[in-house]
Image (cartoon, rainbow, N blue to C red):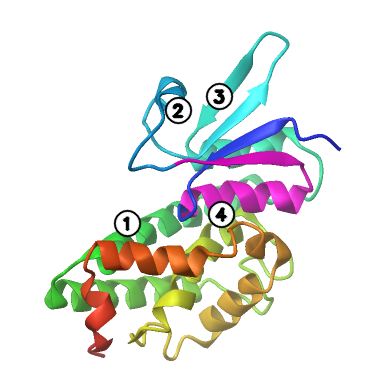
Amino acid sequence: MTASLTLISHHLCPYVQRAAIALHEKGVPFERIHIDLANKPDWFLKISPLGKVPLLRIPQDKGEAILFESSVICEYLEETQPGAKLHPADPLTRARHRGWMEFGSSILSDLWLYETTQDRETLEAKRSVLKTKFATIGAELGDGPYFAGFKFSLVDAVFAPIFRYFDVFDTIADHGIFDGLLRVTAWRNALAARPSVKAAVTDDYAERLMAFLRKHDAVLLKAGKIAA
């Protein structure tokens, strides 16, 4: 099947990964174009109101439509594309899922400073914040492998890229963020094994993330064991 949708991407962006995971879960063919956010091409700036990824290009009878913001893209895919449903049918449950998706975005904000700071005290403060937030969502988890039990949802698509960071962080620092969070750890492992999650990044993701940390002279690279 020929891809009609195009996902404008960056290799490391967790928000792009959300949309890619949703597309893979639904079995929707798509083309993916990676750009360099440090050197944004003119054609991209012309179609991206915020100058950010992801963008979804959708062919129309005349020209194309452009969607921006990962949450908007994921909602559009859920409403228009066939395949697995990634939102609950019940309105209240669906609204709660959207709330936890926003909670995931707040974790990404914390992660940005955690991975880029050159200050040890800031690193340790953000480590504490992250552990608390993972404990908070851990209290919402049931017995199934995913957020909503045995059914994969958009909440999972939001958290899989978050957990992916720690696959790399685990190799360079003893952060202890998931210590004692058994359900969160099981959830993290289940998401890492999901084919759509694996397919959401290129094979050199870890190498690219390490290069990003070195570029920012991140104290995380030198941290060793971060205070418990």
Of label 2 and label 1, which has the lower sequence position? 2
Mark 4 highlights which residue? Answer: 97
Identify the element where label 2 is drawn: helix
Identify the element where label 4 is drawn: helix
Q: Which mark is residue 44?
A: 2
Q: How many marks?
A: 4
Label 1 and label 4: CA atoms lie apart by: 19 Å
Identified at 42% across, 73% down, the residue is 134
Of label 1 and label 4, which has the lower sequence position? 4
Please tell me whether residue 19 belongs to the stretch shown in magenta.
yes
Label 2 and label 1: CA atoms lie apart by: 24 Å
Q: CB atoms at circles 3 and 1 under 8 Å apart?
A: no
Of label 3 and label 2, which has the lower sequence position? 2
Of label 2 and label 4, which has the lower sequence position? 2
Mark 3 highlights which residue? Answer: 66
Few, some or many residues within 10 Å of mark 3 (<14, 14–19, 20+): some
Residue 85 in sight here? no
Given this view, does label 2 or label 4 mark the residue nearer the observer? Answer: 2
Few, some or many residues within 10 Å of mark 4 (<14, 14–19, 20+): many
Mark 1 highlights which residue? Answer: 109
What amino acid type is highlighted by mark number 2? Phe
- Judged from this view, the residue extending furthest toward the right is 1
Pinpoint residue 106: horizontal percent, then vertical percent: 36, 56
What amino acid type is highlighted by mark number 1? Ser
Q: CB atoms at circles 2 and 1 under 8 Å apart?
A: no
Given this view, does label 3 or label 2 mark the residue nearer the observer? Answer: 2
Pinpoint residue 54: horizontal percent, then vertical percent: 50, 40
Instruction: Point out the stretch of residues depicted in magenta.
Output: 14-35
Label 3 and label 4: CA atoms lie apart by: 25 Å
